[in-house]
Amino acid sequence: MIDNEGLKREIGVWGLVANSINIIVGAGIFILPVIIAERLGTGSIWAYLICGILMIFIMLCFAEVGTIVTRTGGAYSYIEDAFGKYAGFVTTNVFIFGAAVMANAAVANGLANTLAYFLPFFKIQWIRVLLFAVMFGGLAYLNVKGVRKAIMIVKFNTIAKLSPLLFVGIFGWFFIIPTDHAGLSVHTAPDLGEMSLILIFAFVGAETALNVSGEIKNPMKTIPRGIMLSILIVAILYIMIQMTVQGLLGGSLTDFRDAPLAEAARRMIGPAGATFVIIGATFSMFGNISGMVLNMPRVLFAAARDKVIPLKGLANVHKEFLTPHNSIITYACLGFLFASIGEFKQLAMLSSASYLLIYLGVVLSLVKFRITGRRQEGSYIIPGGYIVPVLSAVVIIWVLSNLPLKELSAMAIFILLLTVIYFTIKLFNKNIIKT
């Protein structure tokens, strides 16, 4: 049975597709082509195909489990419902402190790298740190002052984000001249796995589009069709951009690590093309950061309020501005800290790994619900039995296995720390987290 929740169902397949694409396409694709080509060369397309197919499978799992567990909370609710409070606690913290904070920090570095294409002094570390301080500090100030001012910053439309990508991806083909690719390495299985782990950073976010499920027409059909189409379109767009950039820049691609798309556009139509891409990339990246700084502190606030995390102060509300000021300041400080000490590739990898851990939890939740026979009347069922969830789990684990030892150790220590915190709270204060 579909709960209407008093909302009007007006979003069709293409409305969901547009919403998903707007969320998925962010900073990653402006930076990633050179990182992917450096390791995979002309085999880059395989990493895009792996990520695209994997995300389709994962989103199908989200679509099915989302019709079984209908309460608000997304992946957190699905995993907690399937595996209990401990799993929900870990999921919430990995999402907030792993996926979201690391993603913000990675995008901030991507923005600095892109600006460095025109203004090389942004390569100097202290200037980058100053940029991060002004950016995160300014956004925190606006958010503490009130959500209305913050929303004004967030209102960047999809056209500003997609125009430079479509320009390079579609029209770049007409400017390609056969070039020497000798400077680009061929792919191996370990290379493919590691690059897929980084590239997944550019594909995550489609699950956020399902937050409007209560306003989607005929969700049992619209959601799987819309999600599959959106991932397919994004994968095709990304592949076109990768092939165009490699075709235009050839062996010199790795010389333009800061802004490969800008250099490709410059070779197409001159400095105006580079300026167009830089402006689009800046809008996209800053819009992504401002949106996260607006939304994620509210998740942090709610987690503290609901005692999912043991930091009561984060649930405080400013007496004058009526905003979760402690959560906003904490989140902005974490974003600034990790942006200042990390680099785009490393941060994107950690963020991708965090997302994949959460996705794995959702996939395993679906498997458990199927084994236990939990189902709601009229709920969506993925064709093929267990093929999609099992393949999704296998590929996620394979991609995660390519996480470098340093980053893998950091993730393991983080989860171990969360485990200690959870059971310490449970042991000494059962009123905080009830079993």
Image (spheres, rainbow, N blue to C red):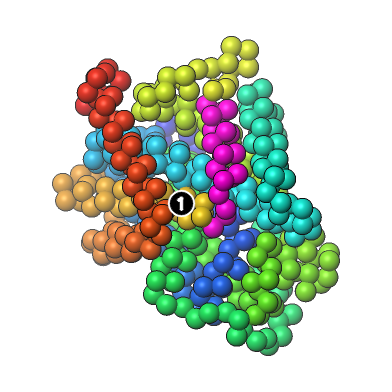
Q: Position of residue 348 (x, y in %)?
A: 51, 54
The residue at the point 39 percent across, 48 percent down is: 410
Q: Position of residue 77 (x, y in %)?
A: 34, 37
Residue 255, by quadrant, is bottom right
Graded by Cα atoms within 10 Å as few (under 14), some (14 to 19) or many (20 or more), the crowding at tag 1 reads many
Dot 1: element: helix
Looking at the image, residue 423 sits to the left or right of residue 19; the answer is left
The residue at the point 50 percent across, 81 percent down is: 186
The residue at the point 72 percent across, 71 percent down is: 264
Nearer-the-camera pick, 50 or 415: 415
Report which residue position mark 1 lands on.
350
Q: Measured along the vertical axis of the image, is residue 271 above or below residue 288?
A: below
- Where does the N terminus fall, quadrant-wise? top left
Residue most toward the top? 319
The residue at the point 68 percent across, 77 percent down is: 252
Magenta-drawn stretch contains 329: yes
Secondary structure that dominates the magenta span: helix
Mark yes or no: residue 362 visible. no
Type of amino acid under label 1: Leu
Mark yes or no: residue 425 visible. yes
- Where does the C terminus fall, quadrant-wise? top left
Q: Measured along the vertical axis of the image, is residue 331 above or below residue 262?
A: above
Q: Measured along the vertical axis of the image, is residue 372 above or below residue 390?
A: above
Q: Position of residue 379 (x, y in %)?
A: 30, 48
Residue most toward the right? 271
Magenta-tinted stretch: 327-345
Looking at the image, residue 151 sits to the left or right of residue 430; the answer is right
